[in-house]
Each structure stands twice: as C-alpha cells, then as structure tokens.
Amino acid sequence: MKRYCLALDLKPDPTVVNSYKIHHEKIWPEITKSIKDSGILNMEIWLVDYRLFMIVDAEDDFSFERKTILDAHNPKVEEWEQLMWTYQQALPTAQPGEKWKIMEKIFDLSVQ
C-alpha cells in the first residue's frame, strides 16, 4: 500500500469553509466510485484554519497520472472539481494549474 499526503488552501472566508465542509458530509456517489475505481483504498481530508490536508492510502499500482486521465473522461468528476475549485485556492508555491500539492514525508517514528 502507498500513502500520499497533499495540501491545498481554502479561500479565507468562514462561509466558504462551512460550505466546503457541508459538501464533504456526503460527497456525490459518482465521486466515491471514481476515487475507489482509481485504486484509492481510503482518503481523509483534515482542516486547520484555511489549510486542507489530504491523506490517501492507495494500492501499490496507483498513480496520480492514471487518476487524472480517468477523471478527465468523467463528466461528474469534472463537475465536482469545478465546484470544489470555487472554494479552493492554490498554495502560494503551486505551479499554474496545480491544485493539491504532494507533501514530502520528513519523519516517520516507525523507522527511528
């Protein structure tokens, strides 16, 4: 199993944060299916202030490149992503068109 951690910001507005949280109380079933179909076994999103932190546990053969291709051919995923982008904003260091940034793992207690 692979684990990825990613970060993204929400727009700095408490109303935006609240709306984003409401959308994630019960995501669209097509989105759940697309996540699982891509090889993701579990996904969590955590929030502090306006910063989102996503933890993705995926099958060993999972790739973000393949997920991107699958998503590009799924109108419901594209609709969801457009809706979510109304609440989100890229991190200051993001490249043009980059949303979630993969974080670098710098510590693991299990290997100490």
Image (cartoon, rainbow, N blue to C red):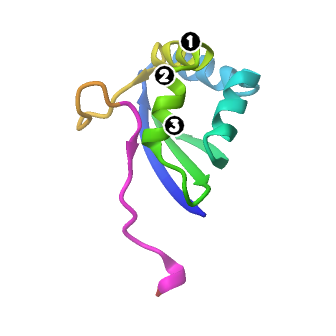
Q: Which residue is mark 2?
A: 72
Residue at left offset 48%, top offset 22%: 72
Query: Going by the image, does 51 lie left or right of 20?
Result: left
Q: Amino acid at mark 2?
A: Ala
Residue at the bottom extreme of this rendering: 112
Disc marking residue 67: 3
Percent x, y of residue 77: 58, 20
Q: With respect to residue 58, does 87 lie above or below?
A: above
Tell me, yes or no, whether the two marked residues, 2 and 1, touch with CB atoms within 8 Å.
no
- For label 1, the SS is helix
Tell me, yes or no, whether the two marked residues, 2 and 3, touch with CB atoms within 8 Å.
no
> What range is drawn magenta here?
99-111
Prevailing SS of the magenta stretch: loop
Percent x, y of residue 67: 51, 37
- For label 3, the SS is helix
Q: Which residue is mark 1?
A: 79
- Per the model, the C-alpha gap separating discs 2 and 3 is 9 Å
Q: Where, by quadrant of the figure, is residue 65 drawn? A: top left
Percent x, y of residue 45: 59, 41
- Per the model, the C-alpha gap separating discs 2 and 1 is 10 Å
Q: Nearer the viewer, mark 2 or mark 1?
A: 2
Q: Amino acid at mark 1?
A: Glu
Q: Amino acid at mark 3?
A: Lys
Q: Residue 53 versus residue 36: which sits nearer the camera?
A: 36
- Per the model, the C-alpha gap separating discs 1 and 3 is 16 Å
Residue at left offset 46%, top offset 32%: 68
Percent x, y of residue 16: 53, 17
Query: Going by the image, does 72 lie left or right of 33?
Result: left
Q: Count neighbours of disc 1 (C-alpha within 10 A) and say few if under 14, some if 14 to 19, many if 20 or more.
A: few
Mark 3 or mark 1, which is nearer the start of the sequence? Answer: 3
Residue at left offset 54%, top offset 82%: 110
